């Protein structure tokens, strides 16, 4: 009886270790988001970058105060996707989503990356550099 209990407890211990290490490996590969923003007297600029994503198409949403802007679907490059939002005409011509120069309110921006079905994959908030 003791031998059987020892075998069962050994198997249970091994199973717990296996699942615990699997969870930490999954966390290491979890989706990540980086939001960089800058507010000047005549310009708002925001970058939303996703990493460790499953290859596919994603959109981005940025919010600041009552302001909201949406970037259309974009295919990831490997496991990364990048979105730019800007009030500078040159950056808009280069592909940034147009936002107002006064888009950033209260010095903070919340960004979301959504999958092709519109589900939020990851979200984060960042304090903006104010110049």
Image (cartoon, rainbow, N blue to C red):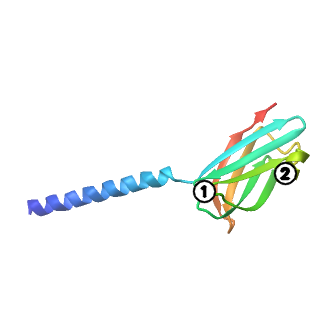
Locate the C terminus and report the quarter of the image it occupies.
top right
Where in the figure is residue 58, as x and y percent of width and height?
A: 69, 61
Where in the figure is residue 89, as x and y percent of width and height?
A: 91, 47
Mark 1 element type:
loop
Where in the figure is residue 78, as x and y percent of width and height?
A: 61, 58
Going from the N terminus, do you reach mark 2 or mark 1 first? 1
Report, in whole angstroms, how far the alpha carbon at label 2 lies from the one at label 1. 23 Å
Q: Residues within 10 Å of mark 2 (few under 14, many from 20)?
A: few
Query: What residue sits right under mark 2 in the picture?
Result: 94
In-front residue for pair 26/13: 26
**Residue 45 position by quadrant:** top right
User: Which residue is located at x 88 percent, y 44 percent?
Assistant: 88
In-front residue for pair 17/89: 89
Query: What residue sits right under mark 1 in the picture?
Result: 79
130 vs 104: above or below: above
| Residue furthest top in the image | 131
In-front residue for pair 4/59: 59
Mark 2 element type:
loop
**Residue 42 position by quadrant:** top right
Q: Residues within 10 Å of mark 1 (few under 14, many from 20)?
A: some
User: Which residue is located at x 84 percent, y 51 percent?
Assistant: 94
User: Which residue is located at x 8 percent, y 63 percent?
Assistant: 1
User: Which residue is located at x 30 percent, y 59 percent?
Assistant: 15
């Amino acid at each position: 009886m003791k031998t059987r209990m020892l075998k069962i407890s050994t198997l249970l211990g091994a199973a717990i270790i296996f699942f615990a290490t699997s969870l930490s490996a999954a966390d290491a590969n979890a989706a990540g988001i980086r939001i960089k923003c800058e507010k000047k007297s005549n310009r708002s600029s925001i970058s939303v970058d996703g990493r460790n994503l499953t290859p596919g198409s994603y959109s981005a949403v940025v919010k600041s105060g009552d302001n909201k802007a949406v970037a259309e679907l974009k295919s990831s490059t490997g496991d990364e996707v990048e979105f730019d939002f800007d009030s500078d005409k040159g950056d808009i011509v280069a592909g940034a989503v147009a936002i107002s120069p006064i888009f950033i309110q209260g010095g903070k921006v919340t960004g979301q990356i959504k999958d092709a079905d519109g589900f939020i994959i990851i979200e984060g908030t960042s304090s903006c550099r104010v110049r």
